[in-house]
Amino acid sequence: MEILLYCSVGFFLLLGVIGSVVPILPGPFLSYIALLLYHFFITSINIYYVFLIGLVMVMISLFDYFLQIYGVKKVGGGKYAIRGSLLGMILGIFLFPPFGVLLGAFVGAFVGAKIELKKSPVKIAFGALWGYIVGTIFKLVFSIYLIYFLLF
């Protein structure tokens, strides 16, 4: 039974790292599930630490969502560029894996900015790309930290 629990924790940690890069999977949340499994079924962790990590997980998830929007808006994009960036990211996963996420966010924001007749659609597309990359870095750091904390 204990081996199954360790395998489950490892599985959720792995999914958390994958989900940090792939927008369809909630990476930090899956890593947090691994922490909860570890806490309740393997070894008890300080409950304040569990709540603190949960709060950090919620903050990173919200920050990631708004960071891409902020990246587009900061360089002058509007709602079509934001929607194009998000739609391009989702389509990019299926059309051009594994780099389709980056390409999709860039192309989607570019097309959205062109529809809005903005003066610098390339700049807006790079803003979307910047927001996605920074958010992904935060999610990856969180997921890798939980791997380090739980396994080492």
Image (cartoon, rainbow, N blue to C red):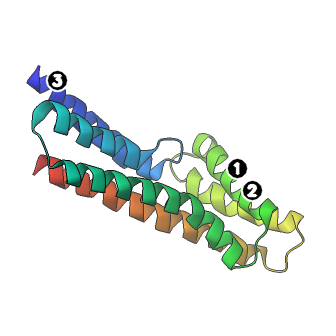
Q: Are marks 1 and 2 in contact (CB under 8 Å)?
A: yes
For the residues carrying marks 2 and 3, which lies nearer the camera in this image?
3
Residue corresponding to mark 1: 87
Residue corresponding to mark 2: 84
Q: Secondary structure at mark 1?
A: helix
Q: Horizontal placement of 66 versus 52: left or right?
A: right
Q: Amino acid at mark 3?
A: Leu
Q: Is residue 64 above or below residue 28?
A: below
Q: 143 or 18: which is nearer to us?
A: 143
Q: Secondary structure at mark 3?
A: helix
For the residues carrying marks 1 and 3, which lies nearer the camera in this image?
3
Where residue 105 sits in the image (x, y, percent)? 64, 59
Residue placed at 79% from the left, 68% from the top?
Answer: 78
Q: Secondary structure at mark 2?
A: helix
Distance CA(mark 2)–CA(mark 3): 42 Å
Residue corresponding to mark 3: 4
Distance CA(mark 1)–CA(mark 3): 38 Å
Q: Amino acid at mark 1?
A: Leu
Distance CA(mark 1)–CA(mark 2): 5 Å
Q: Amino acid at mark 2?
A: Gly
The disc at residue 29 is: none
Q: Say whether disc 2 or disc 3 marks the residue closer to the N-terminus.
A: 3
Residue placed at 43% from the left, 53% from the top?
Answer: 58
Q: Say whether disc 1 or disc 3 marks the residue closer to the N-terminus.
A: 3
